[in-house]
Image (cartoon, rainbow, N blue to C red):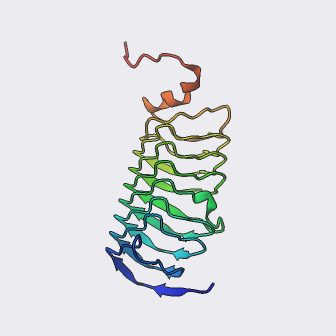
Amino acid sequence: MSGVYKLDKTFEKADFDNNLFLKGEYENCIFNNCNFYRTDFSETIFIDCHFTNCNLSITNLAKTVLRDAAFSYCKMLGLMFDACNQFGLSLSFDNCILDHCSFYETKIRKTVFKNVRLYETDFTRCDLSGSVFDHCDLTDAKFENSILEKADFSTSYNYSIDPEINKIKKAKFAFPGITGLLAKYDIEIDHTIS
């Protein structure tokens, strides 16, 4: 791959919305308080990189390599993770906003989503085996033909998952969130215990 090679670099408060982002390979780099709004990451390689307090909304991820990429306190609206290079795709999210993102047909087993907002995010045909959704808001997130085996939703809420069209064997759920498994039946559930 042509382009820059950056190793063990820290980028502080860089505004790539107004400056040209240099494509290439970034390894073990830290990005703090950077603005990547509408930045073109296509065919860029990120290995063991950490993004903190960054705006990555509407970033182009076509053929982007994300291996052991960690995102904390980031705004990440409308990202198409399904456009990434799928080989070795490995992510983690902590206190991020991932509204309107797509993980369609991605294989992201054992991914950790901690305190993440995932409004209308698409997990159709996604393999999330062993993933953890820790205190996540999954309002209108889409799960269809998804593999959720051994995934942990026990502290998450506002999800609607149809057990008939998703693989949920040994997945963890807790009350009252578990009512999201029955949403398609349009039934009323009494939350009081007599």
Q: Residue at x 46, y 86 (%)?
A: 7
> Closer to the camera, 170 or 176?
176
- Residue closer to the observer: 16 or 69: 16
Residue 11 sits above or below residue 74 on the image: below
Please state the horizontal and vertical placement of residue 22, each as a whole percent of the image: 49, 81
Q: Position of residue 49 (x, y in %)?
A: 46, 73
- Name the residue rendered at 39%, 20% in the picture: 191
Q: In this view, does 88 lie above or below 110?
A: below
Residue drawn 66% across the image and 68% down it: 87
Q: Nearer the viewer, residue 87 or 134?
A: 87
Q: Quadrant of residue 57?
A: bottom left
Residue 192 versus residue 141 in the image, above or below: above
In the image, residue 148 lies at what x, y percent? 60, 45
Q: Which residue is drawn at 64% across and 67% down?
A: 85
Quarter the C terminus occupies: top left
Residue 188: % across, % down? 48, 16
- In the picture, measured across the screen, residue 39 lies left or right of residue 127, that is left
Q: Quadrant of the N terminus?
A: bottom right
